[in-house]
Image: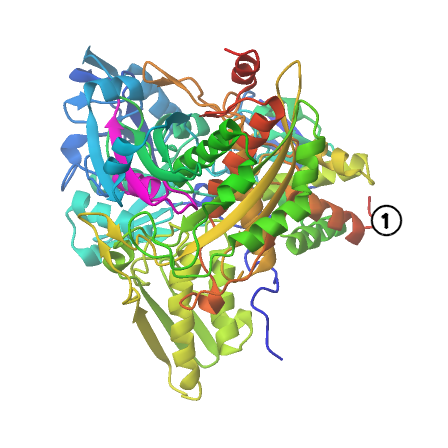
Amino acid sequence: MVIEFYLNNEKKKIDIDASARLLDVLRENFGLTSVKEGCGEGECGACVVLVNGRAMNTCMIPVASIMGKSIVTMEGYKHTDRYKAIETGFMEAGSVQCGFCTPGFVMATESLLNQNPNPTDDEIKEGLSGNLCRCTGYNMIIQGVRLAIEKGAGLW
Amino acid sequence: MKENISKSILRVDSRKKINGEAKYISDWKFDNVLYAKTIRSTVAKAKILSITLPEIPAGYYIVDKNEVPGINRMQTVVSDHPVFAENDVQYIGQPILLVVGPDREIIYSIVAKIEIQYKEQEALFTLEEAEKKSTVFTDYHYRKGEPETVFQQSGQLIEDEFTTGYQEHVYLEPQGIAAEFKEDTLFVYGSMQCPFYVKNALLDTMDLPEDKIRVVQTITGGAFGGKEEFPSLTACHVAIAAHKTRHPIMMIYDRSEDILCSTKRHPSKIRYKVAFDKNNQVLALDVDVLLNAGAYNGLSPAVLQRAIFAAGGVYNIPHINVRGRNFMTNAVPSGAYRGFGAPQTIFGIEMLFYNIAVKLGVDPLEYKMRHLLKKNDPTSTGGQIREEVKLPEIIKKVIEKSDYYNKLKTNKKYQGIGISLFLHGCGFTGKGESVINGKITLEKNKDIVTLKVSSVEMGQGAETALRKIVAQTLKIPIENVIYGEVDTGLVPDSGPTVASRTTMIVGGLLRETAMEMKTRWNETEQFEISKRYEHPKYLHWDDDNFSGDAYPVYSWGANVAEVEIDPVSYEITIKNIEAVYDVGVPIDNRALKGQMQGGIAQGIGWATIEVMESENGKLKQSNLTDYKVPTSMDIPEIHCSFVLNPYEFGPFGAKCAGELPSVGVPPAVAEAVANALNKTINHLPITPEKLMEIDNGN
Ligand code: FES
Ligand code: FES
């Protein structure tokens, strides 16, 4: 099946088995390895990308369903000002340890702030609750999000 | 101005991890790569009668025990695990053979057609059955004082028993490994803690000369002990496949395969007998530690040693008798997990003291404090506590910060507060550090210094900490200190990245070497200095009788946990964690806090929601949908602070840190739950179902 969609703001066309997981298509057909597989079951959020601006688990999305949609991965997102604010926030707060969960958390943060630029602590926790981190105990990730909001004032 | 080592700096590896450029092993590409899929036993114990293979298409291969060039055993403490099963299988998930080829779909179709006939045999599943049948792998013993005499003479005795369950590491990056031959040299790349363990295992299995094997650690997405011994097995698998096919081989587990067959924290049962003096002080302790090692002994003897040496906790008990046994069951082998046996026994001893205090009607913390170890006291193995024990200061701080006594008074039913006191022996147990005899190299080239160590960055911050130690010693910017690629062909064996030893032992060596380098800083030629670890001479250890200094020094801590229990669902909410530690001197305050918070989160998980059970040798949990680990909703704000207590042989005074938080928090949570319901908690994890039973008096 031929799927047309936007990937990091570029129009793409691919002929592929409709049931292929978006995760595999991004990693293998497009070489976008910032998208990680942590569970393959929609539980960990390591494979999250933005689908029309919303954080979604690519391991649960058959590629057929992205027809005409816009997909943004870290490879594209990292060039934005919003990303810079999140990067600085995460670096300064110590949000990163092993890093395997981190691109997913960045995507989840973008999605959260996009919908709610001024979340409370509880809203941050809830917004990130689809992403697992085994290293940090979350405190410093939440702090990273808070710092990102500060650094990126006016961007969301 | 003197720089403060504890002042936080930015992690050197964070940007590439945030922007997604960091390449983990599953992100690597090899030309002409073949993928490997493992066929595993589906039964708990059996003879293999026959293996029927479908027709194997050209370019696809079967790799099994017959392809092993050297010894078909994975090298570790006890090298008893076959690399590939021979004529029998001992647990569900045991590797039998690999299907290897270029297309994963075709591999799966071959896998689906392989038929294995078994003759099943009677298997052993639980610790109880194993104890009854005495399937003992290892039986250890040690004593201090004259416990037998005291028990004979003592009138009143208390007995108590504690049990704990499995814990799965859930490093977010599943196990992954690759191998290739470049001419006649074997290269293995992967997510791992101990490149030289892997290399040594390959030496046995591949029958290659030492200089023909290179093991390269790739960016590692969490490990926590789960990538200590296990990658030695998968490395052998891919190496044998590469040897047979002469193609690069890649093997990345998905989460369910990882959970099925990788090592876990040992389930345990710990029995205590206590004798008292006339003031109700604990006079003698008899401890019986039982660990479920699973089907092969592997690393379990080392875990058992740490477990039993921690059996007395932070208490000075005059007479102590400790027995520890690893039992064989037909279950997936247990192995290293952050804390390495100590979380089980520290949970036991803390809850024992709590239960005794409640029975005696005295304040638990006050009762615990009556028994605290202090400087110069003997350890339970007859060694000596050589450092200032700052527990009184730690306790004072933690109870003030948490408002412990006030809350203890004002808490209503279903609200609880608990406190744990704990320690962790730094570095390898016993003569481990002398055996490893770790070596490091520092190389200077103009104003650039390269540090060469086999310690790996696996998320814990080793790269930043070690570079920072060297940079601050030499007074040069951290950018001028390079962390050499961890490749066994390029770095000396500074030991495995385990036992909270990296900062203290390897960092200590680096600091010493950097100080020497500083005196030669003006030399213009490139030069390098290597150093080997030497165990402090005043330490003595007798490995046959387990007597002497099991560790050179200890780190200490106290945690307060506050919980709230839902009166209907019995779900536990952790409201607050207050933690105070003595880890010598923090090498980086923020990095260390991150370690502590992460370790606490894992400890909370083990104590509450992380349920892993096995039924007839089969794990009931097979993925992250049914094995739940804490999310951001489950973890409260965790407050950490540090009490300084420099250790003379640690770099800038640092001691061990990484395991301490996972050792310490579970009993604080359990005490808080016990306190909330006014009941005793003798088992982890504390699930709502069990709690409901306990509260209803069953
Ligand atoms: S890999 Fe998609 S949610 Fe875990
Ligand atoms: S940093 Fe390792 S899982 Fe989050």
Measured as percent of width and height from the top left, residue B563 is found at: 64, 30
Asked if residue B396 is positioned above or below residue B146 in the image, the reply reads below
Circle 1 residue: A154
Q: Is residue B449 left or right of residue B134?
A: right
Asked if residue B229 can be seen in this view, the reply is no
Residues in magenta? Answer: B301-329
Residue B314 is a magenta residue: yes
Residue shown at 24% from the left, 51% from the top? B547
Q: Quadrant of the N terminus of chain A?
A: top right
Measured as percent of width and height from the top left, residue B644 is found at: 55, 62
Question: Residue under mark 1: which chain is it in?
Answer: A
How is colour applied across the structure in the image?
rainbow
Asked if residue A101 can be seen in this view, the reply is yes
Residue shown at 60% from the left, 43% from the top? A102
Instruction: Identify the element where label 1 is drawn.
Output: loop
Residue shown at 21% from the left, 43% from the top? B75
